[in-house]
Amino acid sequence: MLDKVSVKEYMAQVGRAAREASRVLAASSTGVKNEALLAMARELDASREHLARENEKDLAAGRDNGLDAALLDRLALKPQTIDGMIEGLRQVAALPDPCGEITDMSYRPSGIQVGKMRVPLGVVGIIYESRPNVTIDAASLCLKSGNAAILRGGSEAIHSNRAIAECIERGLTAAGLPVSAVQVIQTTDRAAVGELITMPEWVDVIVPRGGKGLIERISREASVPVIKHLDGICHVYIDAKADLDKAFAIALNAKTHRYGVCNAMETLLVDEAVAAQILPRLADAYRAEGVELRGCDKTRCLIEASEATEEDWQTEYLAPVLSIRIVASLDEAIEHIARYSSQHTESIVTEDFTRGRRFLTEVDSASVMINASTRFADGFEYGLGAEIGISTDKIHARGPVGLEGLTSQKWIVLGDGHIRH
Amino acid sequence: MLDKVSVKEYMAQVGRAAREASRVLAASSTGVKNEALLAMARELDASREHLARENEKDLAAGRDNGLDAALLDRLALKPQTIDGMIEGLRQVAALPDPCGEITDMSYRPSGIQVGKMRVPLGVVGIIYESRPNVTIDAASLCLKSGNAAILRGGSEAIHSNRAIAECIERGLTAAGLPVSAVQVIQTTDRAAVGELITMPEWVDVIVPRGGKGLIERISREASVPVIKHLDGICHVYIDAKADLDKAFAIALNAKTHRYGVCNAMETLLVDEAVAAQILPRLADAYRAEGVELRGCDKTRCLIEASEATEEDWQTEYLAPVLSIRIVASLDEAIEHIARYSSQHTESIVTEDFTRGRRFLTEVDSASVMINASTRFADGFEYGLGAEIGISTDKIHARGPVGLEGLTSQKWIVLGDGHIRH
């Protein structure tokens, strides 16, 4: 374990190397970046035994430290996990390169041509918890978007992450790229995170992936911009003019398709005009799926449900639990969403053009939908090809963040000796 | 003067009111927003005497406090200043409304339609120094982009700003918008700034406008994203393959067109292959304009100049001073820029296609130019119609920031009862 001063020195050294590598990456061709990604895939495939051995060290330590079964499962690098990592690298290699794209080029009255060129952000710091496969996931997205990456995984996965890092290094070298293009932090000292998020001279953006506690702490302490996602308190509103079959399918899918995901519905809002028709039918279906229902007073007059408290409206259950509220109007639904939503994803079910249009304009969430399940809020479903996370912020990247979210645009100006008069 | 606790309460109240107003603005039509802008223009025109009286209070206090002539000049609301404010409001009303623009709508294999809608950021906090006309400038851009604004001007302009705020309020009221859509902070207590930049629940972004000290302090202390611009250390590089007439015109214009602006050239880089041809001619022209020259050793063999120190390469003169360095190659020029540039604006003068293309790709600045004066880096010259500032950050907005920089994009999804399988 390094002491405080040397953690600071070590991290500054990592940062400086990343900054230098970022300049090489920004000038690297798509072909070279893809070559590195495919070489990493080959290296992982050739290192399966070594990866298993190193992973076993983490698993043994985890068992000794009393990690629960779910955490141990996330920590395990099974053969299928490695297959997935290899497949992921190939998919990212196949994606279009966002860098260098020139758009909006036009002549100005002065005679200059002005447009924008898409460029990497520079250096991306990624902080994540136990899953070691995130190491490959994050490295591949940063590399493809032309950014140097500094990766800080959980200390419980350090042996696995180091073994994966060796494969990454060999892949970079095979393509002629500097090994510092992707650096896995070699110390488990917690002070390293504190340094990483406060080095604006070396790091351009931080992407934390993990529990809410981790993300909140990082956002609070970082002096570098953070692309983050805190909660997913998503709503479906069944409007008075909803097609009730669509409403039934969407409300069921949004809650029960998967429970532990950020785009699952947590609160169902139902217009009082259709509540008596739709709620009993939905309640039966939820009960058949084992979903616990909590409702407002009006809801509890129609179906069996425990009482929803103020806290329920503010809770991301990530579990088979649903809170239900009957509202008097679209206005009341929008009001509820403005107050309790985490601005992740909300959907209205309606056949009414004007109400749908109002919902789309007035609901201020990263994804706003008409007649579709909130479960579609996802980088793959949106066609991004890959996803580094889902942002609930409004600045820079909003909603699912793919390669483009890891880039910026600079202005380019072409002239022929033009000067300003 | 309010005490600490009540400044905190006052600012929270301002923030809460701004948040509420922002929802009204987000749902307001372009017509209503334009009506408010034009009503403000009429109110200013009708209040010229009152504005002059209130401004005189600030000027008198400024004279008593020993403000220098330049500051007093910036503080003065002359009839032409008011004309400019009125004209500015009319121009912003005439700009296209960025909000609601839907782009990239396409069908996905699942059958849903996915696209993006441009939306306001929400609440924008603007902190600025002595010029009271910034109050109108900032208010109009925020309003047009659908954002509520909280404006904090310099304490030396408090009477002027309050008088302008009254015109803004009457304009908002005339258009049926809430007066809290634009709030001018009524206390001169410095603690108000500290509150404003640490209320992420009420404020979405901070735009500081003023000296470097103010901006650095705000960036350091803010817990809200900051759109900022620190330095403008801009470079022109005259390549070995430059057309020397274009090089002469650009290098002269970039330095001497105006001195105290962020897009003025501060360092000239010249390829050694053409230095002997171009530098003496340029030196004569600079001398005729009264520009002080500081050069590297090689430069000083060719022209008369004092010695440029390490500090010169890091300095934004904002004055008739220029540092000159002779470089051996394009690589050395790019290297110098990577090390010393503030990533604002750099320009290469060259007729060589491949070198121009490399410069465009490899120089990581907000504006990168070929054969054009750095003085073109400006929201009006780029066609933005208005400018709230120039960002030297890479996250969110880069370079000149117009109305679009005060907006974000949310995802919209349209379906027909689509659920995820």
Image: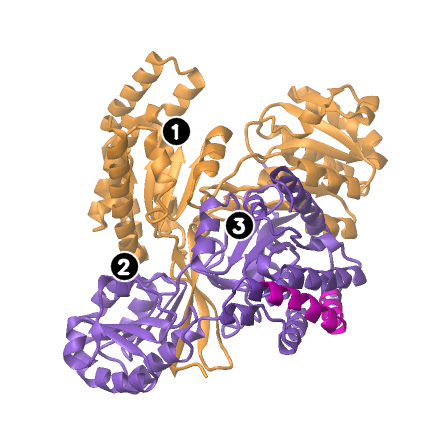
Chain colours: A purple, B orange
For residue B250, side relative to residue A227 (left or right): right
For residue B153, side relative to residue B242 (left or right): left
* Corner quadrant of residue B375: top right
User: Do tag 2 and tag 3 residues touch (Cβ < 8 Å)?
Assistant: no
Q: Which residue is mark 1?
A: B131
Q: Nearer the viewer, residue A149 or A343?
A: A149
Indicate the chain on which mark 3 is placed.
B
Q: Quadrant of the C terminus of chain A?
A: top right
- On the same chain, marks 2 and 3? The answer is no
**Amino acid type indicated by mark 2:** Arg
Q: Position of residue B8 (x, y in %)?
A: 28, 37
As helix, strand or loop, the secondary structure at mark 1 comes to loop
Residue displayed at 64% across by 50% down: A187
**Comparing marks 1 and 3, which lies closer to the viewer?**
3
**Amino acid type indicated by mark 1:** Arg
On residue B319, which mark appears?
none
Residue displayed at 25% across by 76% down: A239
Disc 1 from disc 2: Cα separation: 37 Å
Q: Is residue B88 visible?
A: no
On residue A339, which mark appears?
2
Give the answer, above or below, for where A246 lies relative to B122: below
As helix, strand or loop, the secondary structure at mark 3 comes to loop
Residue displayed at 25% across by 24% down: B54
Disc 2 from disc 3: Cα separation: 28 Å
Q: Which residue is mark 3?
A: B395
Indicate the chain on which mark 1 is placed.
B
Magenta segment, which residues?
Answer: A36-61
